[in-house]
Image: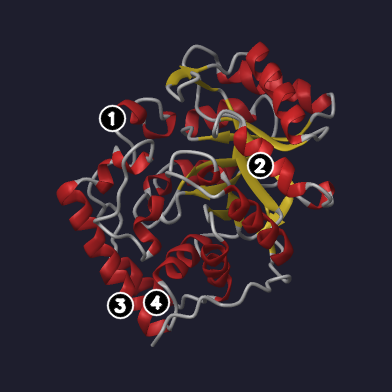
Amino acid sequence: MTPSPAGPAHRDIPGRRLGSTGPTVSAIGLGCMGMSDLYGPADEAESIATIHAALDAGVTLLDTGDFYGMGHNELLIHEALRGRDRDAVRISVKFGAQRGPDGSWLGYDASPAATKTALAYTLRRLRTDHVDVYRPARLDPKVPIEETVGAIADLVKAGHVRHIGLSEVGPDTLRRAAAVHPISDLQIEYSLLSRSIEDAILPTARELGIGVTAYGVLSRGLLSGHWNPERDTSGTDFRAFSPRFQGDNLTHNLALVEALRTIAQDKGVSVAQVAIAWVASRGEDIVPLVGARRRDRLTEALGALEVRLSADDLAAVEAAVPAGSAAGDRYAAAQMAHLDSEH
């Protein structure tokens, strides 16, 4: 049966709340990083058209980072929101990654002064007076999380930030942060190929009333069903350096995708839709972020909202792609070392 990507009209997208204290957002959010950075060239006009299509379809959560394209992504979102109702959208922003003019990565700075300075520039680029969720992109090893969260709490009191989020941190950091100020959600990679959060991080988040915005639900394109092993990933494409896209690892991982494709075909849907629906099925407190850069990919992703995975379906998915079955880490070793969530 030919997979059905479903039409773009999803104005009845259900809502999910980000934790016990966060905002209610659409059950699928749009991650905008790839429109500016890290996945090779992107078409700016098509990127804006994709954001427009998402908003028109009922997507209310846009996720970005001030270091995506060194501010380009925030400027792009501003352009896409021109003439739109700002209050109908929830904008989530990550900060802290330091980059050079050539795009090189220089480390992290989540000190209180840097936190407030970064937000000032973000507000100017977005042309808005507030960010809905503000979060450090990584734990800064030089700065206690209490200081970073405390600085964002000051911004909340001043009205510049609505909610505080975190990204890629472990259980201990979650607890320490939540003791300073309520945390709306933890943004972290979660997919059929990346399930380490299930052991301790997800239970801790649930205990604390912290939601999860799951990025990488298609594992950087591996689980999209569209990945071609001959695809050029030269230049700045993240996947040129990602262990899961290298040599025998890629061959192994694509075999897992083919096993998933059999299940998708039996249901008359696409591989990507099954992968997204699986993440969404893990709990009402989890919001998948999809990184669509084109309208056709967005339409396909939104079709996952119509996919219902039965107990038998879930068992079949588990058999096809068991926990821990991916070959290769989700980041190269140097980047893995920066992940508090992996320690």
- The residue tagged 3 is 262
Q: Position of residue 84 (x, y in %)?
A: 82, 52
Sequence-wise first label, 1 or 3: 3
Mark carried by residue 333: 1
Q: Where residue 153 sits: x, y (%)?
A: 74, 24
Disc 1 is placed on an element classified as helix
Image quadrant where residue 315 sits: bottom left
Q: Residue furthest left?
A: 248
The C terminus, quarter of image: top left
Mark number for residue 313?
4
Give 89 or 292, whichever is nearer the viewer: 292
Which of marks 1 and 4 precedes in the sequence? 4
What is the spatial separation of the Cα atoms under label 2 and label 1, in whole angstroms?
A: 31 Å
Instruction: Select label 2 or label 1 by which is in front.
Output: 2
Q: Amino acid at mark 4?
A: Asp
Distance between mark 2 and mark 4 Cα atoms:
39 Å
Q: Secondary structure at mark 2?
A: helix
Above or below, comparing residue 258 to residue 25 in the picture? below
State the mark number for residue 76: 2
Locate residue 163, reporting x and y percent. 73, 36
